[in-house]
Image: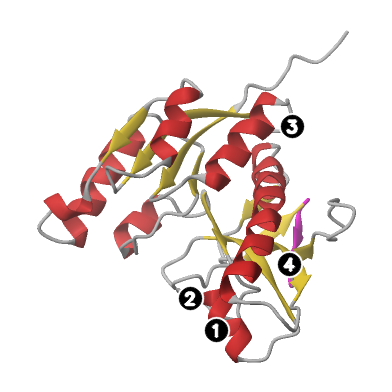
């Protein structure tokens, strides 16, 4: 007797721009590699190109324009109310360029992931590629982490890296890191959807029940986590 299939995990994805990571997630779902149900894509920017990607995939979209709210708290409250309509098991930040307040982050504690274009804890925040070049880094990369109140400071669960070439510019380095992001994010999301990736009461990430004292690494050539 076969066991009944587990229902896909309901998720909401937040974007602010072109939505290339969103597209990678959509494609992973379509290929049967990611057991999630994308219930909605929400953007804080009306002109975000990622909204068109979602619409083409038949996914519900909403714009909650942060410029129409008096302050961050009012925006966060509106965003949270809309997300909760879909009862997500996970909120995915995919190029969402707004800082979120403590109450919002606490509400989704342990069920909100973000991808960041650096090897955290190095270079949190913006302009990561130029900062890596300015610092003379020999390697650079991307990280998936749980979202906490500290900007880009939550437990890192998965990383991938690329070598920095002598002739690299911020643009050329960004392009290579973005390719990594597209491979990296679906892996971490799948771990969460399968119940392998969790977040405990002490603010630690666990994979298969074992505390991640250091993030797992995605080898650049194989694409398979070790």
Number of callouts: 4
Residue at (39% x, 57% y) in the render: 106
Q: Please name the residue that numbered disc 3 is placed on.
A: 33
Residue at (76% x, 69% y) in the render: 162
Mark 2 is surrounded, within 10 Å at the Cα level, by few (under 14), some (14 to 19) or many (20 or more) other residues, namely few
The reply to whether callout 4 and callout 2 are in contact (CB within 8 Å) is no
Quadrant, the C terminus: bottom right
Q: Position of residue 196 (x, y in %)?
A: 73, 45
Whichever of labels 4 and 2 marks the residue nearer the N terminus, that label is 2
Q: Position of residue 213 (x, y in %)?
A: 74, 72
Q: Position of residue 94 (x, y in %)?
A: 50, 50
Left or right: 225, with 38 as reference point: right
Whichever of labels 3 and 4 marks the residue nearer the N terminus, that label is 3
Q: Which mark is residue 215?
A: 4
Q: Please name the residue that numbered disc 1 is placed on.
A: 131
The answer to which image quadrant residue 176 occupies is: bottom right
For discs 3 and 4, the disc positioned in front in the rendered view:
3
Left or right: 221, with 31 as reference point: right
Whichever of labels 4 and 1 marks the residue nearer the N terminus, that label is 1
Is residue 20 visible in the rendered image? The answer is: yes
Q: CA distance from mark 3 to mark 2?
A: 31 Å
Whichever of labels 3 and 2 marks the residue nearer the N terminus, that label is 3
Q: Residue furthest left?
A: 70
209 in the magenta segment:
yes
Q: Please name the residue that numbered disc 2 is placed on.
A: 127
Is residue 35 visible in the rendered image? The answer is: no
Q: Residue furthest top?
A: 1
Q: CA distance from mark 4 to mark 1?
A: 22 Å
Mark 1 is surrounded, within 10 Å at the Cα level, by few (under 14), some (14 to 19) or many (20 or more) other residues, namely some
């Amino acid at each position: 007797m076969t066991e009944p299939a587990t229902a896909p995990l309901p998720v909401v994805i937040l974007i602010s721009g072109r939505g290339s990571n969103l597209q990678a997630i959509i494609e992973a779902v379509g290929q049967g590699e990611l057991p999630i149900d994308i219930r909605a894509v929400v953007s804080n920017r009306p002109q975000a190109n990622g909204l068109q990607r979602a619409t083409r995939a038949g996914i519900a979209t909403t714009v909650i324009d942060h410029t129409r709210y008096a302050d961050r708290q009012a925006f966060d409250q509106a965003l949270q109310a809309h997300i909760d309509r879909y009862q997500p098991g996970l909120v995915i930040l995919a190029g969402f360029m707004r800082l979120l307040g403590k109450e919002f982050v606490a509400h989704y504690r342990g069920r909100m992931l973000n991808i960041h274009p650096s090897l955290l804890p190095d270079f949190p925040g913006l302009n990561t590629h130029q900062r890596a070049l300015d610092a003379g880094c020999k390697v650079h990369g991307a990280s998936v982490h749980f979202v906490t109140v500290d900007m880009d400071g939550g437990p890192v669960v998965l990383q991938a890296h690329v070598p920095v070439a002598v002739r690299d510019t911020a643009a050329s380095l960004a392009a290579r890191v973005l390719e990594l992001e597209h491979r990296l994010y679906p892996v971490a999301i799948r771990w969460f959807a399968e119940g392998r990736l969790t977040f405990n009461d002490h603010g630690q990430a666990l994979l298969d029940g074992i505390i991640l004292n250091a993030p797992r690494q995605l080898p650049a050539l194989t694409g398979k986590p070790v």
